[in-house]
Amino acid sequence: MKRRSLLKAIAAGSVTAAHPLSCLLARNAMAAEGDAPVRTIFLFHPNGAVPDVFFPAAGSSALPAMSAPLQSVYENLVFLDGIGYAGAANTHEGGAAKCLTGRMTFDDRESSIEVLMGKEDWANRASTGISIPSVQMGVGTMWGNDDNKRISFDGATSLDSACDPRLVYPLLFGSAQAPGTMPPAGGGLESKMLSAAREDLNRLESSMGSIERERMQQHSDALSVLEAKFASAGGGGGGGMACMGPDISASPESDRADTDELLSQTDVLDLASDLQQDIAIAALSCGITRTMAFSYGVSVSPVKVPGANLGDHDASHQNAETHTTSKIWWMGQVAKFIEKLKNTPEGNGSLFDNTIIVTVSDLGHGNYHDHYRIPMFLASGKNNNLGLVTGRSLDFRPYGTEKQIGDGQQHPTINHTDVLDTIRQVAGYTSFTMPNKEGDIMAAWRGGDAPT
């Protein structure tokens, strides 16, 4: 990173107290301008869909009724029709157990992909700078205390998707920090990060040649500018220099016994979604974590979303129109999430340019309880730094192999683990591969119509 680029990032607030400056400088004295880590969001929506009303025709940009709320962000999407969950257990619970793990059955002991990514990031935290390996959170996750309905696993242990902003916030930003405020003065994050950056500079300088030392001196000069800014702000992170957690003061208060139910009520869901999205974006932007599972509801979700007359699970067992009325709220929230990511600056672009979203569900067709044609799509910035060519609708069914995918029948299917493993490769993780994969979709990722 060049000196002028570092100063520009500081002025824009992209380099923040919770985004480790030491890691930014130590990554490489001659790193390419605009370099940024890849972030991943694995986003769950419940109860499947009606595939013919969810997927646009291959090559078409016109979205059908169930995915219509995503029309405004179509340029950021890649719809993937023909993806399935291989193996037995054609149930909500079986699909929830498979969607991020690649399990064949619920009893397989596999960790979910964001947990595996988080473990690798944590093992390399001296360079990644993260403080939380991975995050599991969501909206309307009532009934989420049932192990059979969770999507995140650390081996055989299921992980809760916390839906209460007042519980999620202190886990990420620290209990001593009030919502929407800067970290404390004196010994706060700024001081710790500046100290760590100085140590890294000193360590690196001793092992570099004269040209590299000259460039490191430029970084040192920029660091001095940053120190002066902190000092002029009273040393406690004033002047907008620190990475703030979002304001969650509007979050409803309740005792822990009923908070999940309260936050899953129809009239609270919009607010809860806004707050949880803001927390998630801040955690990624600040470098607290690089990967998360974000759940909209849980498997067999009974939540009644705004605009619907039935709970989402009951709606999935009605006709396509009824399920559409429920499903479109979830899709509208995804569109809003994407817009927020696009509006979060990072480097010369946005946070979304360095982020991959992949949506999953527990079922393909919500009424048939099958694991075929999972309502899956990818999303990233239109000019992303990940090589993903967006603004497309792909149908992989002609390229799939016949396999049983949960309903006792054979279907031409691409394993969903091929998609997950492609994301692993693009994001640069090397300590694991996804189980039961048959290949990847790298060719389609880069702009082709076929997966490979």
Image: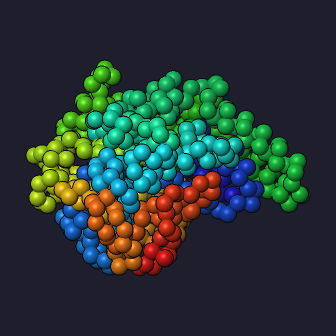
From the viewer's side, name the closer residue of 145 and 304.
145
Number of numbered markers: 0
Q: How is the image coloured?
A: rainbow
Residue occupying image coordinates x 41% and y 29%: 167
Residue 394 placed where, x, y %? 36, 74
Query: Which quadrant holds residue 403?
Result: bottom left
Whole-percent x, y for residue 134 in the image = 51, 42
Q: Is residue 35 left or right of residue 211?
A: left
Q: Nearer the viewer, residue 434 or 220?
A: 434
Residue at image x 33%, y 41%?
A: 149
In this rendering, does residue 341 appear at all? no
Residue 339, image x, y percentages: 36, 56
Identify the residue at the far front of this view.
Answer: 408
Q: Is residue 414 above or below residue 253?
A: below
Position of the N terminus by quadrant: bottom right
Q: Is residue 362 left or right of residue 430?
A: left
Work out whether 76 lies above or below 29.
below
Residue 141 in view: yes
- Indicate whether 447 appears above or below 421: below
x 59%, y 54%: residue: 432
Residue at (61% x, 32% y) in the render: 189
Q: Quadrant of residue 406?
A: bottom left
Question: Where residue 32 sits in the image (x, y, percent)?
Answer: 67, 63
Compared across the picture, whether 150 is left or right of 184 comes to: left
Q: Is residue 407 left or right of residue 4?
A: left
